[in-house]
Image: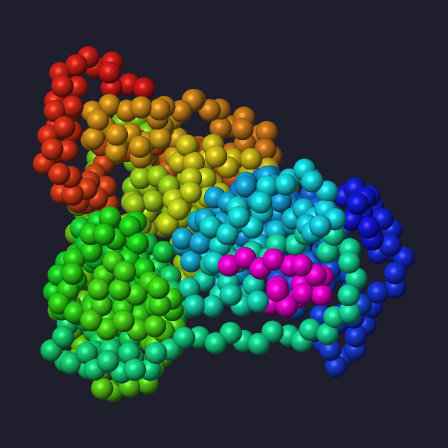
Amino acid sequence: MPWEVSRRSILQVGAVAGSALALPSAAEAGPLHRGWVFGRLTGAAAIAESLKQQAVGCVFGIPGAQQNELWDEFKERGIPYLLPAHEFGAAGMADGYARATGKPGVLCVVPGPGVTNALTGLGEALLDSIPIVALVGDIATGAKAHPFQVHGLETVALIKPVTKRVFTATRACELPVLIQKAFSEAVSGEPGPVAVVVPFPLLIEVADYRVPPPAVPAVPFDETAFEKAFALLEDGHQRIGLYVGLGAMDASDSAAKLAEVLQAPVATSVSGKGVIPESHPLAVGWGFGPHGTIAAEKAFARCTTLLAIGVKFSEVSTGYYGNPKLNRTIHVDANAANLNRHIPADVAVHADAGLFIAKLLERSDRLRRPAEVDLTTRIKSWKAEAVKASRRPHPQKGIDPFDLILSLRKALADDALLFTDVSLSEHLAGEHYEVRRPRTYFNPTGNQSMGWSLSAAIGAQRACPSKTVACLIGDGCLMMSLVELATAARERLPVKVFVLDDRAFHYMQVLQEAAYHRTTATHLPKIDYRSLAHAFGVAYSEATKTESLDPVVKGAMLHDGPVLVRIAANYNDRPIRWIDSVRERYVKELTPQQKVRFLARIASRSVGLKSAKSD
């Protein structure tokens, strides 16, 4: 096929040629090659068969000229797919699918705007360690390719910063192996997004394929470092604090057993909520500094050795690096590059979290501590103290988001999924929403991508159709992704969306008011959410007073389709432990001159006109 012809001509001719060729499918290869990519296939057909080989449950994306051949093969070969309204939504849906299942989500986008629209969602997946395989179209390349092609931005250069690795296909015969490598890379070590870039002419190129099923990826395990860690843990004089993150999410039962063996309080990163049921007698919640739960801070103050498994000590999860340092630290992570970064470790163990915990449990007789009834009694008391200290009189107007979080916990089953977004409520939920099962609580952490939660919840609902999926989102965040309500309605995905409506970027107002004694660019318009829900085809309800909250939340859960629930939010000057802790640490890092300048500015504005505080 000469490359001088236009892209549209290539695709049209390719479609005719594809229908004329009698190309054997994988099913026709016979029992000997079940699970193989086998036969004489176009590049598009080979990709589709490769996805079947990986048992992909859904592809999220929007077709385009460079990928129509591929999307037609998805339909032809029974690859499930879901059409979002925007590629940011597609990336979020693939992310939510992956978080809910532990398997790579699959994204399919065209070059140019398809890629640029998806970058924010891929960046969230990268910084949050979420496996995604992105099938990325590209323009024609090579000496005979036309100049100034549409969507001619440099695809690899754009996508490389937001992925673990980029595989670029140059020949159609490479495609199945590259896809196998992408799936393996996405889950190996520290998970993350991986891209396979496919110039569109390869989709209609024909090749012979004999590609067997992929091998199971190996997991890292440093035996020497493990023995050093075991020696420290074996010392019965050490009081262990167990800190676990997303890397240990699939070792939930083993992590709980290890905590019981060590009689160790268990705290999690925010992404690790659910690794151990937070109803467990040794679970103390998230964080273990002044930014996290009261129970975690108090329990870890009594510990001498930190055993951190599957965590990176990132800014959000540590409250701006505010975790206190214990006498000794053992840090275990599947990514060697995460070790000895922020927290220097006495023993750094490059190992898979689940394998590390399993190896410890094999020697549990040498690690077991006597039961500490006093410890579990104290933890129960500290948890009750935290709830009591957080209660406030109900506001006369609107609803305290703290009460909404408690109401959601009452209404949602233990296996229901809750997605939070970038608002003050993410910190309230992190502290007060009790997570009882792994992979049931989700928060955009590393990239803090506003609007992420709606798309992610839709992706998770597609992955888990029998489970209730709820989304807790601020009005500012919803404005960034609300078009995906139409996707939920069209697909009949019964996501329950609770929007905190206070007509402001309230998170930014809290930060700005403290630093500048006024706010800038934070006021949002009044929105008729009832009409909006009607326009998108989803059910609607609202709660404006605390007395109506529980019935409204319960009613939304009982509805068999998607629901938008407006919550008239009133934070009522509610203190947030994470905010207060981070502000204090930030101020400590200012130079004396910077402190003077900030204080002088605030003092001058405090005597100014009241109108200076408004946007």
Q: Which residues are magenta?
A: 165-180
User: Of all residues shown, which one is farthest toward the front?
Assistant: 143
Residue at 31 percent of width and 32 percent of height: 508
Compared across the picture, whether 120 is left or right of 293 comes to right
Q: For residue 329, what is the image quadrant?
A: bottom left
Can residue 372 be seen here? The reply is yes
Where in the figure is residue 19, as x and y percent of width and height? 87, 55
Where in the figure is residue 28, as x and y percent of width and height? 81, 72
Q: For residue 267, what is the image quadrant?
A: bottom left
Residue at 67 percent of width and 63 percent of height: 175
Compared across the picture, whether 557 is left or right of 511 comes to right
- Check the picture and name the quadrant holding the C terminus: top left
Q: 330 and 271: which one is in front?
A: 330
Instruction: Say if the magenta span includes residue 224.
Output: no
Q: 227 and 78: which one is in front?
A: 227
**187 vs 419: above or below:** below
Q: 254 and 353: which one is in front?
A: 353
Can residue 354 be seen here? The reply is no
Compared across the picture, whether 428 is left or right of 47 comes to left
Q: For residue 222, what is the image quadrant?
A: bottom left
Instruction: Say if the magenta span includes residue 179.
Output: yes
Where in the figure is residue 68, as x and y percent of width and height? 73, 47
